[in-house]
Amino acid sequence: MDLENQRRVKELAEKFGAHDLVVVLGGAEAEASGLAAETVTAGDPAFAGSLAGVQLGLAVYHIFELKDYLDAQAYDDQVELMEMVLDVEAIKAEVSCIRSMYSKYTLDGGNSHGTS
Amino acid sequence: MFEGKKIIILGDRDGVPGPAIEECMKPHGVQIVFSTTECFV
């Protein structure tokens, strides 16, 4: 994940608190999406940026995982086309796996280990 | 589901860009506190 973006995410977590923050990813590949998810939950795996060793545990989702909860028209207009060309299931599985291991929070407000 | 949440958007130029995710989140009245589009190339 971009070093500048790591710095911004860390600042926002310090400013607002991790509980109410939700990170939404738009990654094109499962591996890259998983690395971004890991960075905002368990810390930068490359130990290169501001989040190295920082376990924010943020709620993190790929936009594909939120389809059922979003405005259908907006999703169709903005995202549906990319569903046709990307490996949606692999991306969803990777981000979900990272979230279940490292996220301390979920969108429904619960602890990821206790509610999902 | 999104009530009271502050959203950080990390879009991808080759996937779903930040502005597209913003358009999906806006109807839900969330506060988007940061939005960017990364390039992994």
Image: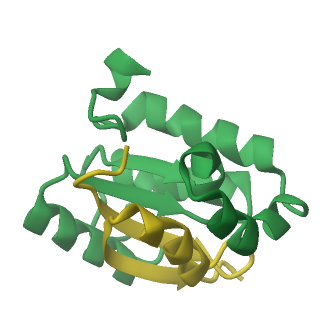
Chain colours: A green, B yellow
Drawn side of residue A41 relative to residue A71, left or right: left
In the rendered image, residue B21, in percent from the top left (x then y), is placed at: 55, 71
For the point 36% across and 27% down, which residue is it?
Answer: A112
Residue A107 x/y as whole percent: 37, 41
- As displayed, is residue A112 above or below residue A78? above
Q: Could you tell me which residue is drawn at 37 percent across and 67 percent down?
A: B8
Q: In which quarter of the image is the C terminus of chain A?
A: top left
Q: Residue at x 46, y 29 (%)?
A: A100
Q: Is residue A64 left or right of residue A70?
A: right
Residue A44 figure quarter:
bottom left
Question: Disc count in the image?
Answer: 0
In this rendered view, identify the residue nearer to me: A53 or A79: A79
Q: Where is residue A43 in the image (x, y as percent from the top left)?
A: 34, 52
Looking at the picture, does residue A67 appear above or below residue A84?
above
In this view of the protein, which residue sits in the foreground, A82 or A70? Answer: A70
Q: Is residue A43 visible?
A: no
Q: Is residue A35 left or right of residue B2?
A: right
- Asked if residue A69 shows in the view, the reply is yes
Furthest residue toward top: A114
Where residue A48 sits in the image (x, y, percent)? 38, 69
